[in-house]
Amino acid sequence: MDFSLVLRRIGEAAPRHRLDIGDPDLPPPPELVEALRGGGDFRYGPSEGLPEFREAVAEVFKADPGEVVAVAGGRHGLAALMWIFRKRRLLTTSPFYPGYFDIAGVFGLELGLVEGGDGWIPNFAERGVYVVNYPNNPTGAVLPRGKVRELVDVAEFVISDEIYRDIVFTEFVSPAELSPSSVAVVYSFSKVFSVPGLRVGAVIAPRDIAREVARFNRATVNVAPTPAQRAVASVVHLLPRRSREISQAYLRRVELASAELRLRFTRPGGAFYLFPWVGDDVKCFESALEAGVSILPGSLYGRGGYVRIALVEPEERLREAFSAINKACGGG
């Protein structure tokens, strides 16, 4: 199943409820909007990122600024790291984030799969360079501390995609906390600040890896957008409060789904997705679309029989969408 064709089908249908793409509906912090309005310096900056941006991110991650590189969004950072480790055995978990395979396909890379078990938690036993994302897209799973330890112990290196680390309903442990010398964290401000179009993020990695990411920048985008770096650097101090606020908002939506969505799903530990079992994911996708709700077939994530629902509408609208999904997909 092709992601672009699915999105084209959704665009043609123009459904009332768009619960397909993870495009946050919560408004950005007004302080960030104001900082962006006030930006007037559009010159180039260093390929590794502006000093003020790297220092601000380093403070959040308790790293050295020399271990931080600004990137043009999380996916650009992932592409850099997968290119750096292109000659190693690359592994990711299933269900998977399709973007990893987009990157692998462009670079001609093989990407092996490790299957998720109970609660979508894998057993990590194979040696290799792991590309993982927790809290997980599409399942919302969060690895317990013991599983994070299992991962870093078996992995040659870990590319830890932590785009959703600020949206959590349980304890989140980054692999970098347990093994900083063998982990690169990919971070983005897209979800936490609700600005996916801004395209600014960071890679936090050992210095030798960070230098290679900066080298990848020079060969591709040259430098992540400097006005975005300045604006974000000025509001990084808002992250703890913002994380609490949006985690509470998305948790209310999870609780609403638990009460009103009559489909079976593992309760997420973070992010803003549900991944319920529906039997025939393509039929459910089409039926829900006809009922005015766009969701995504699990086949896009390597798991037929499931669908991904993004909780990116206010609760009253979600209540209406859940009712339509229940009727369309056999839950009501």
Image: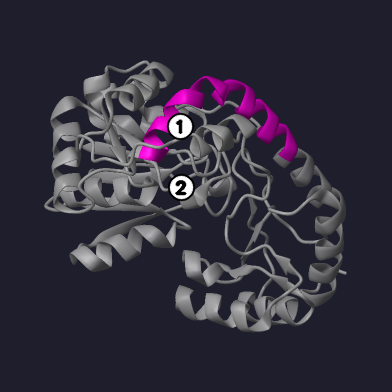
In this image, 68 relative to 132: left or right? left
In the displayed structure, would residue 210 be above or below residue 56? Answer: below
Sequence-wise, the earlier of marks 2 and 1 is 2
Determine the CA span between mark 2 and mark 1: 10 Å
Question: Magenta segment, principal secondary structure?
Answer: helix
Position of residue 160 measured from the top left corner of the image (x, y, whole percent): 36, 38
* Three-letter code, disc 1: Val
At a point 62% along the width and 38% down the height, the residue shown is 269
Left or right: where 58 falls relative to 249: left
Can residue 63 be seen at all in this image of the molecule?
A: yes
- Residue span colored magenta: 227-249
Would you say 305 lies left or right of 65 here? right
Confirm or deny contact between disc 2 and disc 1 (CB under 8 A): yes
The residue under label 2 is 198
**Would residue 191 be counted in the magenta stretch?**
no
Q: Is residue 204 left or right of residue 200?
A: left
- Packing grade of label 1 (10 A; few <14, some 14-19, many >=20) is many
Q: Position of residue 71 (x, y in %)?
A: 31, 42
